[in-house]
Amino acid sequence: MPAKKDVELRLKNAFKELAKEQPVDKITIHEITERAGVIRTTFYHHYQDKYELMEQIVREEIILPIEPLLENDMINEAVRLIFSNLMREKELYMKLAKTSGQNSFEQIAQKCVMDILYRVVGGKLKAGIDAKTFQKNWLSPEMLSSYYSRTIAFAVMYWIDMGMPYSPREIADIYEYIISHSLQDVVDELRLGGG
């Protein structure tokens, strides 16, 4: 009997191959298991559905690699790594980004980013600030994690929708510029021809 990690890898690879060939909503569990060389019940021992499998791929391949950077306060480098990880499998993520609805790629990516931001960055904030401060202040770890996960997911989706024309470094720099300036600063700079 194959090890759990081996089966999960086979299922992930099968899903990724199929996602390059057809929209995610058209992929069946039968196609995934057939390509992975396992029986249908094996799939359900590991995943509830294909969207949970897609979430595991996004979490493990795009989001978890940024954790050491976040832990070392290297937030800009973490954002750049997200874009680099997406670019590494450009064809796959261009297709996955077209998944819409309740289990859209954008929602899954946002959830994965929010989870890691809340765990790592939120944990640092909670450790450094009295809990009563957060109860009275709407700038809580939950709110900040939610806000920044939305901005990162938006930047990812916009970049993918454009066809990933900028390098990971360029798009990360654009993202950093936008979030580090007020709307007024950006408008003034563009109006004066500095952008």
Image: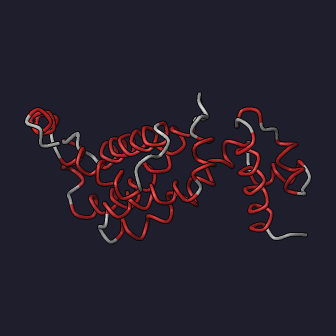
Quarter of the rendering occupied by the C terminus: top left
Residue 33: percent from the left, percent from the top? 86, 50
Q: Is residue 82 left or right of residue 98?
A: left
Q: How many marks?
A: 0
Quarter of the rendering occupied by the N terminus: bottom right
Q: Is residue 94 left or right of residue 37?
A: left
Q: Residue furthest front?
A: 193
Question: Is residue 40 or residue 173 the one in the foreground?
Answer: 173
Q: Is residue 53 left or right of residue 154?
A: right
In which image quadrant can residue 82 be found? Answer: bottom left
Identified at 28% across, 58% down, the residue is 126
Question: Is residue 119 or residue 31 the one in the foreground?
Answer: 31
Question: Is residue 107 or residue 115 the one in the foreground?
Answer: 107
Residue 119: percent from the left, percent from the top? 41, 58
Residue 170: percent from the left, percent from the top? 34, 54
Identified at 11% across, 39% down, the residue is 189
Q: Residue furthest top?
A: 101
Identified at 44% across, 64% down, the residue is 66
Vertical side of 107 occupied by 116: above or below: below
Residue 134: percent from the left, percent from the top? 23, 47
Question: Is residue 35 or residue 50 the one in the foreground?
Answer: 35
Vertical side of 8 occupied by 103: above or below: above
Q: Indicate the colouring scheme.
A: secondary structure
Vertical side of 41 occupied by 97: above or below: above
